[in-house]
Amino acid sequence: MATSVDPEAGAPADLVELGRIVSAYGVRGWVKVQPYSADGEVLLAAKTWWLKAPLPAGRQGAFSSAVAAEVLASRPQGATIVAQLDCVPHREAAEALKGHTVWVPRADFPPSDDDEYYWVDLVGCQFFGEHEGRSVLIGIVAEVMDNGAHAVLRVGRAVQGAQGVLIPLLNARGKPVEVLVPFVRAHVHTVDIAHKRLESNWPAED
């Protein structure tokens, strides 16, 4: 069910960043968006996008509050998506949106097919491997990437500390220790999104 938009209520709490406006498209005020992942079909299905503008220099990585934009039309354009928004009447307005990030509420995502998962749901999952026939925690999924053939999980190594708190593992330089795991059935055999847990046969240290 789509999330209703109440201008006085502010942005939904479950917004997920899915792409960035990279340029204007055409002469009628369309925008071109670069999706971040294979979840670009969510942008095509959404009736409302929430846009966040980058804040001035000196506050890198910071963005303004989200503003709703109704999607009047959208379609794939190569590796990008082009769209007509109700708040963009002409090309100059579209050019002014360059650098804005595009967000969609998680509640508005179309249902996924069996054995298919949205990448955003995999991030934050505990990832378990095998060691001497036992399931052993390897770490936490920090990112899902696409190498062209399949998805790849970037897992930050972690161990359980007191009271079950997960402690990230760091190398001698203080950098996080990471493992890259192909997200394919041959390695990842159980995906439990409800409990944020992935089981695999990936070699794990005890």
Image: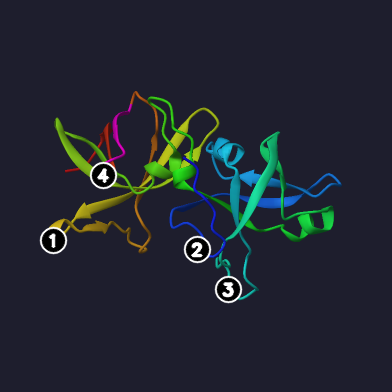
Residue 162 bears which disc, if any? 1
Distance CA(mark 1)–CA(mark 2): 40 Å
On screen, residue 161 versus residue 17, left or right, reads left
Q: Tag 3 or tag 2, which sits nearer the N-term?
A: 2
- Determine the secondary structure under disc 4: strand
The numbered mark, 4 or 1, whose residue comes first in the sequence reads 4
For label 4, the crowd category at 10 Å Cα-Cα, with few meaning under 14, some 14 to 19 and many 20 or more, is many
Q: Marks 2 and 3, how far apart in space? A: 26 Å
- x, y percent for residue 187: 32, 28
Q: What residue sits right under mark 4 in the picture?
A: 138
Mark earlier in primary sequence (1, 3)? 3
Q: Amino acid at mark 4?
A: Ile
| Labels 1 and 3 touching (C-beta < 8 A) | no
Left or right: where does residue 27 sit relative to residue 199? right
Tag 2–tag 4 contact (CB < 8 Å): no
Reading the image, the residue beneath label 2 is 9
Which type of secondary structure does the marked residue at label 3 adopt? loop
Residue 129 in the image, given as x and y percentages of width and height: 24, 36
Q: Which residue is disc 3 drawn over?
A: 59
What is the crowding at mark 3: few (fewer than 14 residues within 10 Å), some, or many (at least 20)? few
